[in-house]
Amino acid sequence: MFLGIGKKKWDPKGKHVYITGGSQGLGLALAKLLAKKGANISIVARTQSKLDTALKEVETFRTSPTQSFQAFSYSLSTAPSSAAALAAATAGHNDTFPDAIFCCAGSAKPSYFVEMKEAEYEEGMRSGYWTQAWTAWVTAKEMAKTGKKGKIVFVSSTLGLMSFVGWASYSPAKHAMRGLAEALRSELLLYGISTHIFFPSTMYTPGYEEENKTKPSITREIESTDKGLTAEQAAESLFKGVERGDFHITADLITNIFKASSRGNAPRGNWMVDTLLDIVALVAVPIWRRSVDKQVLAHREEHTAYLRNKGFFDVPSSTLAPEPC
């Protein structure tokens, strides 16, 4: 249809919606929004105490006595635990497998690449990619086997469309998330499963407060022009995108520009708006890149002093150190 006119919108009322990372931040805000719209909700996270508190908050948005709200404590970093979480949620909702999966779990620990420990770099991929990928894998197999026409919704980041200093342990996972979503958007058409991916900018959540503990000063400086989003604003943008049937979902102008500059073969939404953004991106993205490069180069002396004070130059790299005899 022209500009999506006449296209049927997704309605979560009465559907079983499964949300990972549902105990706080974007996941919790989304659970509240969907509860208000009549959905049955399963929230999944690692910490039971946070889930208990979150479930009480979700209850305040109930619109019908027949709605079912459940919480499940699981780590989603492996395929077996992801399968177990989905099985528990299905059993908890009268053996009804979720109609829509929202993968909101994840965390970030920004730092300089040369300072990262091996385990921290690996954790970036686990928390940023595998916690969503395993859930999607289990979901897709079950939906394909049973013929369920559902939705799988991933959460990437503006940093899944571009990146800069400080985000080397985080943005690779978010770029990988985009790659998985684009492959599945095509492949899952075979089963009538729709795929979506959200690219939020900075979100002011408990996770944001955690990442600021390790965030380099130059990263903060570059991000200072980003107004950011509350979890509620991000959840509203995500829901509206899924409701419209958008594949790439964004919530702010700067992310829209980066999306336009790196769209690849992803389908367009509003073709007139996207074409205009294509033109803007041709000019705006190179200007932004040069501005960031200038800030990074100006930070070089301060950064060298920082590494020297940390003793970085006095310790041999573990990857280059000779093997003990």
Image: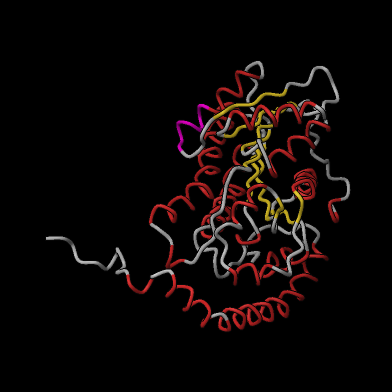
Return the x and y of residue 37 as percentages of the image width and height.
83, 32
Does the magenta-highlighted stretch encompass residue 181? no
Q: Quadrant of the C terminus?
A: bottom left
**Which of these two is toward me, 150 or 22?**
22
Residue at x 64% of width, y 30% of height: 51
Q: In the drawing, does residue 295 fall left or right of residue 253?
A: left
Residue at x 48% of width, y 31% of height: 81
Return the x and y of residue 43 as percentages of the image width and height.
65, 31
Residue at x 77% of width, y 63% of height: 227
Return the x and y of residue 12 as percentages of the image width and height.
78, 33
Res 260 → quadrant: bottom right
Res 26 → quadrant: top right
Q: Which residues are magenta?
A: 78-84
The extreme left residue here reads 325
Q: In the drawing, does residue 15 fall left or right of residue 181?
A: right
How many marks the image carries: the answer is 0
The extreme front residue here reads 309
What secondary structure is the stretch in magenta mostly built from? helix
